[in-house]
Amino acid sequence: MSFAADVKPLFREEDRSSMDFAFDLWSYDDVKANADLILERVEDGTMPCDESWSEDKVDHKGKFFRYDGASVRPQPAQKPLEVWLGGIAPSALDRCGRLGDGWLPSFATPDDVARGRAHIQQVATRADREIDDGHFGALVPYVNGYIPDELADMVRKRRPDVEVTDVVAKDLSALRPLLERYIAAGASKFVVVPVVEPVNWDDHVGDIADAVHPLEN
């Protein structure tokens, strides 16, 4: 299992009403209403990016983007540079199976991960592709015992069918059991994200290591 700690908290300790732009409740309705269009643009942009990381020049004539002889310099040292996608909607899972090298959804329950992994693998097989078994994971937020109302409302708005604690660990003692549920569902890559900024980062990083290190291999 692999873990990464995102050092940008979703909420500042001194102002819990401050929301990260990616979790803006006001913009979510707009995103939801235009989800198909957004995903089309993501797909149209993913293909030329992927090619430009390995090819000298790329020509692309898509619905939204057009490139003639585009190139990236310097090219990534990692060959190939992997494309990890998220999302749990069927269209997002299809896209990952056809184009992605890994899947890292947010606010997905362990059951979502199990179903999503199976769906992606089926799509990949039909596309004559193979996604590494170790390239399925989840972004997992956690709090320090208090789930901010803004976060709880946002989760309920996005996922009215799930319990908040199925996608957000209520504290570090709950983080490991939640990760173990994801592992049982077939996930092995995790980004754990503090919702509220810790008072002391050095101490907190040590606490996180103690909580998740026994799961790492």
Image: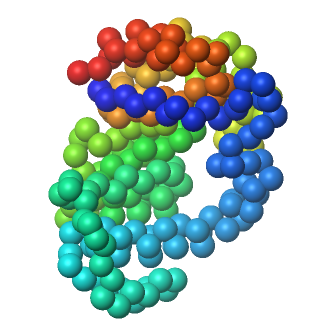
In the image, what residue occupies the spot 28% across and 83% down?
Answer: 58
The image position of residue 126, as x and y in percent, is 26, 64
Q: In which quadrant will I find the C terminus?
A: top left
Q: Does residue 139 appear to the left or right of 212 in the view shown?
A: right
Q: Is residue 101 visible?
A: yes
Closer to us: 61 or 88:
61
Closer to us: 67 or 174:
67
Displayed quadrant of residue 94: bottom left
In the image, what residue occupies the spot 31% across and 29% down?
Answer: 2
Displayed quadrant of residue 144: top right
| 55 up-or-down from 30: above or below | below
Q: In which quadrant will I find the N terminus?
A: top left
Task: Please say which color scheme the image uses.
Answer: rainbow
The image position of residue 155, as x and y in percent, is 69, 37
The image position of residue 3, as x and y in percent, is 37, 28
| 5 up-or-down from 146: above or below | below
| 191 up-or-down from 100: above or below | above
Q: Does residue 66 appear to the left or right of 146 in the view shown?
A: left
In the image, what residue occupies the spot 47% across and 83% down?
Answer: 65
Q: Does residue 89 appear to the left or right of 62 in the view shown?
A: right
| 47 up-or-down from 166: above or below | below
Counting every numbered tag in the picture gives: 0
In the image, what residue occupies the spot 28% across and 70% down?
Answer: 73
Displayed quadrant of residue 62: bottom left
Q: Is residue 110 visible?
A: no
